[in-house]
Image: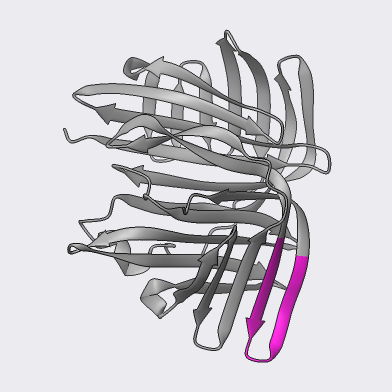
Amino acid sequence: MNDHFCGWYYKCQSEKETLAVIPAVHRANGKTTCSIQLITEAASWSVPFPGSAFHGDGMQVSIGENRFGPQGLHLHLRAPCLRASGTLRFGPFTPLRYDIMGPLRYAPFLECRHSVFSMRHTVTGTLQVNGVPCVFQNGTGYAEGDRGRSFPKGYVWTQCALPAGALMLAAADIPWGGFHVTGVTAAVLWQGRQYRLATYLGAKATDIRDGAVTIRQGRARLTARLLEPAAQPLRAPSGGAMVRTIHEHAACRAFYRFQIGENTLFALEVPNTSFEYEFP
């Protein structure tokens, strides 16, 4: 079997708490392993497991005593640097109308394929993280996933909850027939409507620099700008192995503006947003 990885990302947020849990299974050099990462605004941890600890398929998976699925997650982590336990229950997912990758999900050459399982759902329950309770009572959740061989060499990704809505934006360097192009995709839930900007719909990244990205698609323009660098390290795949270090802001301030023509749908400074900026 070729080197590969498959990971799931569950973000859980309340007025006081933000954490993301990232279970993954990875195969490199003929060996399968798995891991669970946990990140908060103040710290991050990565707990390794043997490949035999992984069970399941699709979104219903387990790693050891830890379980993950559309209904929620259960943690029982015991590692030298981390003790995490508890159960979180998810409300009904809010999926996109169609796959975030569109027709590109069939492209055989992609290093990484992205999925968005839920733009917004409720989170209820308590996790104990190194003795500190993280309590969620009708909190806000987000769920996505990645699979392939490697994360892109350069990329920016951000996600946030908006008033009664949500936003996800990604732009990445993509090898394409000996060249490199910048692929983009974004989904916005706003005032009961879903908006999609993507390369396969004609969207382009017009500016990526200094922690900010702007993408355009016809008359639509979406900008995201990191305001408060405070990233924590995470492990990411390269050739199937979790040997790369990236940095994520699990809960930081960022600015978002969404315009269609002369109409500005929103221009907001959002607290507790998630942001990864891995462009040089």
Q: Is residue 163 visible?
A: no
- Quarter holding the N terminus is top left
How many numbered discs? 0
Q: Residue at x 59, y 29 (%)?
A: 38
In the picture provided, is 86 more to the left or to the right than 176?
Answer: right
Measured as percent of width and height from the top left, residue 128 is found at 73, 20
In the picture provided, is 155 more to the left or to the right than 240?
Answer: right
Task: Name the residue at the bottom extreme.
Answer: 262
Colour scheme of the rendered structure? one colour
Is 119 situated above or below 2? Answer: below
Q: Nearer the viewer, residue 181 or 22?
A: 181
Secondary structure that dominates the magenta span = strand
Span shown in magenta: 255-268
Q: Residue at x 47, y 39 (%)?
A: 8
Q: Is residue 109 visible?
A: yes
In the picture provided, is 166 more to the left or to the right than 5?
Answer: right
Is 55 situated above or below 11? Answer: above
Q: Nearer the viewer, residue 14 or 118?
A: 14
Q: Quadrant of residue 194?
A: bottom right
For residue 262: magenta? yes
Measured as percent of width and height from the top left, residue 154 is found at 41, 53
Q: Residue at x 41, y 59 (%)?
A: 172
Q: Residue at x 71, y 63 (%)?
A: 255
Task: Name the residue at the top extreme.
Answer: 80
Measured as percent of width and height from the top left, residue 213 is found at 56, 66
Task: Name the residue at the right extreme.
Answer: 15
For residue 149: magenta? no
Q: Quadrant of residue 165?
A: bottom right
